[in-house]
Image (cartoon, grey):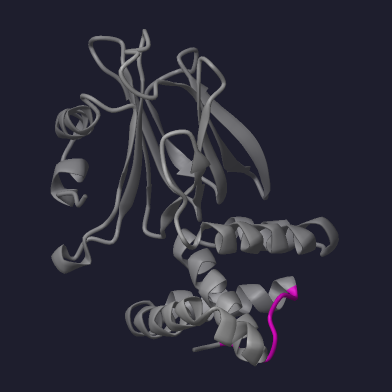
C-alpha cells in the first residue's frame, strides 16, 4: 500500500483522517513507500482502542526503543501514556501486544514517532522512517525475507556497543538511512568474502548488489557515513563502498 505523503505532512486533521481511515477495520498496518511517486517514507500504523473490537488484532501496548542522550533505552506506549506524542524513536524492535499477550513484532532502523488521541478515545500511532520497517514475527503476519538478516545485523552492532568506548554514541547519532546503508554494506561484504555463502544465498547477493548501486546513486552521503560508522565500530573489513 502506498501513501500520499502530502496528506501526512499537511496537518493534524488530515493525518488523523488518513490513519483513521486505514485502521477503520484493522489493528495495525504496515504502509510501504511507493518509489514511483517519489515516496521514500514507510509507516507502521497502530490503533490503541478504548475497548478491543474482537474483530482483529487489538494492540493494548507498544514497546520500542528511544535514544536518551547517547544511550538507548526501552519505551512503551499504552492508554496510560500522555498524548500527543511527537518524537524520534531508535533502531531495534517494535512490539505490539494485545490483552492476551499475543504479539506482532517489527524491526526498524529508527525514525519518527507520532501518536494522538481521537475524539472517541482511540489513540492512533505512526512509526515512520525513510529506511525499511520489516515484519519480524507475530500472530497476524508473515516474516519479511530480510528480517532475519536485519536481526542478525542488530545483534552484531550490539557487540561493540558493549565493548568499544563511545560506540553507543556513534550509533545513536546515525540517521536511520545511515544504519540501513551499514546493513547493506555488511551483507554485501559478508557474501563477497565467502563464495560458497554467496552461491547458497544468490537472491540475497543479487539484492545487496542492486541495493548498493541504488543507494550509492541516490544517497551517497549516507553511504559514506555508513562506511565511517562501521570503521568506528570495528565491524568493517576493507570495503567502504559498493
Main SS class of the magenta portion in the image: loop
Rendered position, 211 above or below 147: below
Left or right of residue 31, residue 129 in this image: right
**Residue under the point 46% across and 74% down:** 222
| Residue 106 in view in this figure | yes
User: Quarter-wise, where is residue 87 in the image?
Assistant: top left
Residue 10 placement (x, y as % from top left): 16, 41
Residue 200 placement (x, y as % from top left): 58, 81
The residue closer to the viewer here, 135 or 122, is 135
**Residue under the point 30% across and 55% down:** 41
Rendered position, 159 above or below 54: below
The residue closer to the viewer here, 86 or 75, is 75
User: Quarter-wise, where is residue 160 in the image?
Assistant: bottom right
User: Quarter-wise, where is residue 8 in the image?
Assistant: top left
Magenta-colored span: 234-240
Q: Is residue 239 magenta?
A: yes
Residue 221 placement (x, y as % from top left): 44, 78
Left or right of residue 235, residue 81 in this image: left
Rendered position, 31 above or below 211: above
**Residue under the point 47% across and 44% down:** 88
Amino acid at each position: 500500500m502506498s501513501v500520499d505523503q502530502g496528506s501526512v505532512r499537511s496537518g493534524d486533521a488530515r493525518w488523523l483522517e488518513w490513519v483513521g481511515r486505514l485502521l477503520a477495520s484493522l489493528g495495525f498496518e504496515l504502509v510501504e513507500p511507493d518509489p514511483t511517486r517519489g515516496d521514500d517514507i514507510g509507516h507502521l500504523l497502530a490503533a490503541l482502542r478504548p475497548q478491543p473490537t474482537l474483530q482483529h488484532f487489538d494492540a493494548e501496548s507498544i514497546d520500542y526503543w528511544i535514544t536518551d542522550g547517547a544511550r538507548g533505552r526501552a519505551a512503551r506506549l499504552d492508554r496510560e501514556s500522555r498524548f500527543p506524542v511527537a518524537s524520534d524513536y531508535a533502531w531495534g524492535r517494535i512490539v505490539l501486544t494485545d490483552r492476551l499477550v499475543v504479539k506482532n513484532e517489527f524491526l526498524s532502523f529508527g525514525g519518527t514517532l507520532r501518536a494522538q488521541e481521537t475524539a472517541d478515545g482511540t489513540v492512533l500511532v505512526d512509526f515512520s522512517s525513510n529506511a525499511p520497517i520489516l515484519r519480524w514475527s507475530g500472530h497476524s503476519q508473515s516474516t519479511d525475507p530480510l528480517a532475519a538478516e536485519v536481526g542478525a545485523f542488530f545483534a552484531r552492532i550490539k557487540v561493540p556497543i558493549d565493548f568499544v568506548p563511545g560506540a553507543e554514541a556513534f550509533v545513536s547519532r546515525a540517521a536511520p538511512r545511515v544504519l540501513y546503508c551499514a546493513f547493506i554494506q555488511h551483507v554485501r561484504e559478508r557474501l563477497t568474502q565467502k563464495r560458497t555463502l554467496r552461491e547458497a544465498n544468490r537472491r540475497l547477493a543479487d539484492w545487496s548488489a542492486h541495493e548498493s548501486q541504488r543507494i550509492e546513486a541516490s544517497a551517497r552521503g549516507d553511504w559514506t557515513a555508513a562506511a565511517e560508522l562501521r570503521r568506528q565500530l570495528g565491524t568493517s573489513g576493507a570495503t567502504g563502498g559498493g
